[in-house]
């Protein structure tokens, strides 16, 4: 019996391309229905992971199981359980959107009537009514991505792989992809989404696996990732930027030496005591009659998290060993 407790199980997987060690022992899991964000800069190994899970590449060592099927021993079982988008290769440019959907249904063994009914459903669901009878070759980038994803849903999969689904899309098309991920989640489909956009992973994912140079450098919820790397800090923005120096002197009492950050219009300190720090800073600033535009407890952004975890920003260039 396949193991249904995890939709995805990746155990110490390695993969090299000649001298390039793309994956150097990667492990993670995803529970059924979970949205897992795989976050990393260009060249981190994200596509290699997806290709191994989708059975397009074989791992050199380690084990990967998708919806209970081992990617090496039961590749056919994996392929029946998944959807992989972003390839476009399977779409026929000469056919209309509707015809492509029907063709997919027929290839998957549906009867003609059933395939047409499913195609009509997906056209409506993906807001492609206007495009249904136009050949796919004349679609815009955003429409193409939608019909591509719709083709993958003719038979709903257990696991969906979206490899950088929003890279290069305009904001409106990006929003549509985000809605789509929410739709997968609502149907209990496990989604692995790779991205270079930290805010995207933060927005969509239940859990984030951060990959850098072929290794997992963090695996946590977005909220805990942010907490782990520096925790929250207290930020004070005066009405008059000239008051910055005085504020820095006042809040210095509430933070370890050398941790006060003074900007051109704001001062921030680590909130070692969370809301308690915020309350004391607010009282102290108020006692000096300094006019304050904003005072708040802030958590670090995922950008800062990434910086803290990998020691560098993203994206970044490969350095030859
Ligand atoms: N077919 C290939 N041949 C040689 N090197 C490859 C191949 N595919 C990927 N790589 C290398 O493996 C590393 C990881 O690539 P990839 O998984 O595509 O990263 P990402 O998707 O995170 O940008 C990179 O250094 C890349 O250049
Ligand atoms: Mg990639």
Image (cartoon, helix red, strand yellow):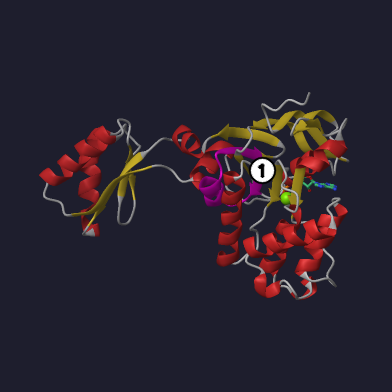
Figure check: 72 above or below 305: above
Residue 130 image point, x, y percent: 66, 75
Name the one closer to the observer, 236 or 183: 183
The picture quadrant where one finds residue 251 is top left
Residue 199 image point, x, y percent: 52, 51
Which residue position holds label 1?
A: 192
Q: Residue at x 77, y 26 (%)?
A: 2
In the picture, measured across the screen, residue 223 lies left or right of residue 77, that is: left
Q: Of helix, strand and loop, which one carries label 1?
A: strand
In the picture, measured across the screen, residue 236 lies left or right of residue 109, that is: left
Q: Residue at x 52, y 38 (%)?
A: 308
| Region in magenta | 192-211
Residue 99 image point, x, y percent: 81, 67
Image quarter of the C terminus: top right
Q: For disc 1, does the CB lie below 8 Å from ligand 1?
A: no
Name the one closer to the observer, 28 or 109: 109
Q: Residue at x 83, y 36 (%)?
A: 77
């Amino acid at each position: 019996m396949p193991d249904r407790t995890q939709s995805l199980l990746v155990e110490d997987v390695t993969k090299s391309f000649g001298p390039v060690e793309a994956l150097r022992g990667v492990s993670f899991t995803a529970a059924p229905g979970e949205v897992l964000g795989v976050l990393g800069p260009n060249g981190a190994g994200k596509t290699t992971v997806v290709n191994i899970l989708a059975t397009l590449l074989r791992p050199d060592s380690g084990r990967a199981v998708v919806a209970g099927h081992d990617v090496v021993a039961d590749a056919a079982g994996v392929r029946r359980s998944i959807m992989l988008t972003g390839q476009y290769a399977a779409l026929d440019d000469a056919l209309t959107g509707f015809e492509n959907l029907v063709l997919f249904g027929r290839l998957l063994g549906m009867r003609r009537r059933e395939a047409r009914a499913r195609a009509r459903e997906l056209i409506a669901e993906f807001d492609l009514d206007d495009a249904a009878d136009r050949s796919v070759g004349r679609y815009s980038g955003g429409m193409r991505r939608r019909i591509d994803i719709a083709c993958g849903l003719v038979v709903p999969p257990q696991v969906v792989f979206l490899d950088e689904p929003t890279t290069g899309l305009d904001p409106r098309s990006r929003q549509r992809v985000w809605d789509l991920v929410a739709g997968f989640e609502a149907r209990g489909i496990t989604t692995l989404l790779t991205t270079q956009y930290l805010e995207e992973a933060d927005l969509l994912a239940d859990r984030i696996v951060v990959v850098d140079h072929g290794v997992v450098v963090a695996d946590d919820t977005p909220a805990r990732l942010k907490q782990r790397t520096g925790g929250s800090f207290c930020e004070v923005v005066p009405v008059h930027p000239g008051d910055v120096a005085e504020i820095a002197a006042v809040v210095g009492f509430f933070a370890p030496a050398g941790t006060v950050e003074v900007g051109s219009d704001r001062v921030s300190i680590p909130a070692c005591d969370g809301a308690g720090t915020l309350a004391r800073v607010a009282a102290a600033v108020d006692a000096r009659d300094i006019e304050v535009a904003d005072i708040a407890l802030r958590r670090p952004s995922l950008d800062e998290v990434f910086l803290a975890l990998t020691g560098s920003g993203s994206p970044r260039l490969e350095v030859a060993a």
